[in-house]
Image: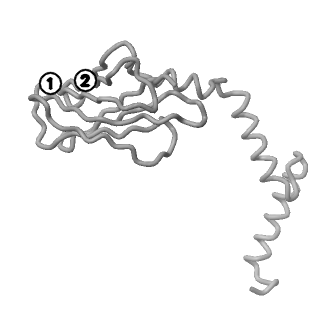
């Protein structure tokens, strides 16, 4: 590109004008992007509500498994999860019971255990039919080194979809 090219000269003049304007308002030089990021970050810190991660988990919980079974709706059918024995404690064999009302699924459901917001290795409970619409399997909820006690059980019916129960366990 030749420096005498009118397009280049016009671009250079506009660039210099923009830099003068930015310098005048205090955002000039190479520090513009870091300053902009700082301003946006500070806006987020002071404007966003002060909600802790623990509060968010409490808001997500939809099941008090320590008190009894929990029921959620999936595709118009009620799915009930129960975990025995009570109280539900980590690091021991547990029996997971799932009941679905109304429709008989074409394939057996399964449960994937994990923690909300945490990538974990697979922990699947294979369920077998014990009665019409009732399935059972055994599994273990492991103890999290972080001390968090909120767990999720994602119940998947291959032909209907999935429903997620979020609850607390005892360590």
Where is mark 2, residue-wise?
A: 80
Q: Residue furthest bottom?
A: 2
* Residue at (73, 76) in percent of width and height: 7
Callout 2: SS: strand
Of 50 and 77, nearer the camera is: 77
The span from disc 1 to disc 2 (Cα, nearest Å) is 9 Å
Q: Is residue 71 left or right of residue 107?
A: right
Of 70 and 44, nearer the camera is: 70
Where is mark 1, residue-wise?
A: 101
Callout 1: SS: loop
Considering only vertical position in the picture, is 70 above or below 30? above
- Neighbor class of circle 1 (other Cα within 10 Å; few <14, some 14-19, many 20+) is some
Picture coordinates of residue 48 (x, y %)? Answer: 66, 28
Q: Residue furthest top?
A: 67
Of 158 and 6, nearer the camera is: 158
Of 29 and 8, nearer the camera is: 29
Picture coordinates of residue 142 (x, y %)? Answer: 47, 36
* Residue at (37, 19) in percent of width and height: 65
Q: Are marks 1 and 2 in contact (CB under 8 Å)?
A: yes
- Neighbor class of circle 2 (other Cα within 10 Å; few <14, some 14-19, many 20+) is some
Considering only vertical position in the picture, is 169 above or below 139? above
Considering only vertical position in the picture, is 14 above or below 139? below
Rendered image quadrant of residue 10: bottom right
Q: Is residue 58 left or right of residue 112?
A: right
Rendered image quadrant of residue 55: top right
Picture coordinates of residue 57 (x, y %)? Answer: 52, 26
């Amino acid at each position: 590109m030749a420096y005498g090219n009118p397009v280049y000269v016009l671009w250079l003049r506009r660039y210099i004008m923009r830099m003068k304007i930015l310098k005048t308002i205090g955002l000039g030089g190479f520090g513009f992007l870091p300053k902009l990021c700082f301003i946006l970050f500070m806006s987020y810190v002071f404007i966003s509500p002060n909600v802790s991660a623990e509060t968010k988990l409490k808001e997500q919980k939809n099941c008090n498994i320590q008190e009894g079974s929990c029921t959620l709706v999936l595709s118009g059918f009620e799915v009930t999860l129960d975990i025995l024995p009570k109280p539900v404690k980590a690091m021991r064999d547990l029996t997971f019971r799932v009941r679905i009302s109304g429709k008989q699924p074409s394939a057996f459901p399964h449960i994937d255990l994990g923690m909300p917001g945490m990538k974990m290795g697979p922990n699947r409970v294979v369920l077998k039919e014990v009665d019409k619409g009732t399935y059972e399997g055994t599994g273990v909820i492991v103890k999290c080194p972080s001390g968090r006690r909120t767990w999720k059980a994602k119940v998947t019916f291959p032909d209907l979809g999935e429903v997620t129960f979020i609850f607390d366990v005892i360590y």
